[in-house]
Image: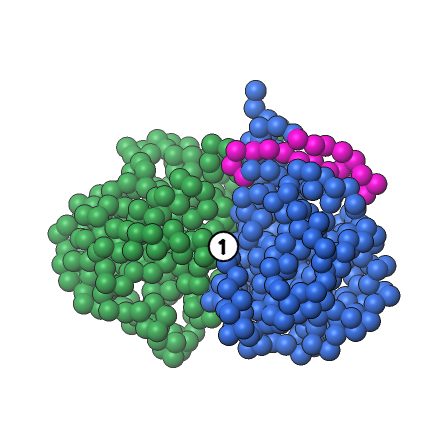
Chain colours: A green, B blue
């Protein structure tokens, strides 16, 4: 017998992983949650059939969504993670001793519970006393916070289904308001390659660009995401993502990473022309 | 009816593209050659079942294997392409007016003939009077050339089957000899992500590193190649791949690219830590 997990990257492109078995399958109030065991990627989390993380390559996504902003504000104290119920983003942020508290707001408590049981590699972080989990709608949560956070990380699912509201203008505007004067917002920003993804990415960029004085895009190689070419958004009130980096302080923290490093930080903002063109169209 | 082209990226990972039809299928003396028409990627060339290029994303591979070295030696005159029978690499090199001749050595004339008929987007270049095609074994060809080329581009298939010899120490040593004093060799260098690919990449790097005084690796996002994270090798006698770039001259050439640009050139040499570690192990 062979068991394969298949994700449609587009209606014409399938990405399939041979799995040993399905460890969990359930329907929460918000989405279907599946966990698979695989030889190539270790454990795999899928939400509504979309691959969210694998044990083998989650380090790339989680390092890139956290260390890029933290190199700019390495003494950040108060962090907000919207989404991120798998705990991977919190795990990376907890490596900074300056961090006093992480508020993690995920709409779906069951994702966190399933990950705690099946993917401790990321979800163990949720048990850390510095992490406060709020299981509610991030779109609503953010409305009631002002001048509070050093860093907001929008670690959302795709811009349809439960994650849809986290790509709206209202949401980004409220993130701006919830950030301190020196605050940074980073978000997962979809992929530029397949046309439908590129359109979603362009629309998100326009909304962030309209909400923040500084708004730039950076990229990483994430093999299990559609096209493997994944983008992140860096938005801030005053900090430039490259010139603003505090390398002396960041290096002194001696944080061991497997993907991220300062040279790659700079290089990740050098986008291909075709991506620059998609982005510039709406600036 | 649905027709799908599937490539096994590993025994546990399938990448599948829905195709409208098979335009060509034949067995040459060296390999099986297939051309498909697809809605997502346009025409697709596969050799022995491995995807070699698609009309949609071949620009990434071909720009990155050519403009990176040409930015360092933008007035190169005599170029050798080993492999590259689809013509995409020759097409990019022909955009430099300084280039007087391109010797293209591919073992399989049928690949070039099939591409001329079905993929003119890349193969039209082979009809250019500056391109001299030699259909023979690149491993043998290179033995009889000395101090002749400004640039050698090893645009090979994978390190098994017909392309195997193009990853040997003897071959790289002969490339060194065939280059002028200021010469550069660039090669397609496989992917770092899946263990078997990473091993092949490491082995190739060791052999190039042992043959050339300067040997560095750079990367690109190529969505239709395994993992989407693809590497290239830059080896030279005297030129540093970044400090040696002649941006003033390159920009004056006004070559319009869709992926490559000078910032990305620099950024592409900033490798993730896990890739640096694979590479450093053999240096």
From the top left corner, tell me how far across and down residue A131 is, in percent.
28, 57
Residue at x-position 36% and y-position 43%: A199
Query: Percent x, y for residue B12?
Result: 61, 40
- Name the residue located 59 percent from the left edge and 43 percent from the top edge: B54
Q: Position of residue B115 (x, y in %)?
A: 69, 42
The residue drawn where x is 34% and y is 55% is A280
Q: Which residue is identified by label 1?
A: B258
**B128 with respect to A189 (left or right):** right
Q: Does the image show residue A171?
A: yes
Quarter holding the N terminus of chain B is top right
Would you say residue B30 sits in the magenta stretch? yes
Disc 1 element: loop
**Residue A74 visible at all:** no
Residues rendered magenta in the picture: B23-41
In the picture, which quadrant includes the C terminus of chain B? bottom right
Q: Report the predominant secondary structure element of the magenta stretch.
A: strand
* Position of residue A46 measured from the top left corner of the image (x, y, whole percent): 42, 39
Q: Give B24 or A135, whichever is nearer the viewer.
A: B24
Q: Is residue B49 left or right of residue A56?
A: right
Residue under the point 29% across and 34% down? A30
């Amino acid at each position: 017998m062979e068991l394969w997990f298949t994700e449609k990257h587009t209606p014409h492109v399938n990405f399939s992983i041979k799995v040993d078995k399905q460890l969990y399958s359930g329907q929460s109030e918000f989405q279907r949650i599946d966990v698979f065991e695989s030889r190539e990627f270790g454990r795999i989390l899928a939400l509504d059939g979309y691959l969210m993380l694998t044990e083998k390559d989650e380090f790339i996504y989680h390092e890139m969504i956290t260390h890029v902003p933290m190199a700019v504000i390495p003494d950040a104290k108060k962090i907000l993670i919207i989404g991120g119920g798998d705990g991977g983003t919190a795990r990376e942020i907890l490596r900074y001793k300056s961090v006093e508290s992480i508020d993690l707001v995920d709409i779906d408590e069951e994702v966190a519970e399933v990950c705690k049981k099946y993917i401790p590699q990321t979800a163990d972080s949720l048990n850390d006393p510095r992490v406060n989990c709020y299981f509610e709608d991030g779109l609503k949560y953010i409305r009631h916070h002002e001048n509070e956070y050093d860093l907001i990380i929008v670690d959302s699912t795709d811009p349809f289904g439960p994650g849809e509201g986290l790509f709206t203008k209202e949401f980004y505007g409220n993130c701006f308001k919830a950030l301190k004067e020196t605050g940074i917002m980073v978000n997962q920003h979809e992929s530029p390659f397949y046309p439908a993804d590129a359109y979603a990415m362009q629309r998100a960029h326009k909304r962030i660009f309209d909400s923040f004085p500084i708004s730039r895009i950076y990229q990483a190689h994430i093999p299990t995401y559609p096209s493997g070419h994944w983008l992140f958004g860096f938005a801030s009130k005053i900090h430039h993502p490259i010139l603003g980096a505090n390398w002396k302080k960041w290096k002194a923290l001696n944080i061991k990473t497997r993907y991220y490093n300062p040279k790659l930080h700079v290089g990740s903002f050098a986008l291909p022309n075709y991506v620059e063109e998609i982005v510039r169209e709406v600036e």
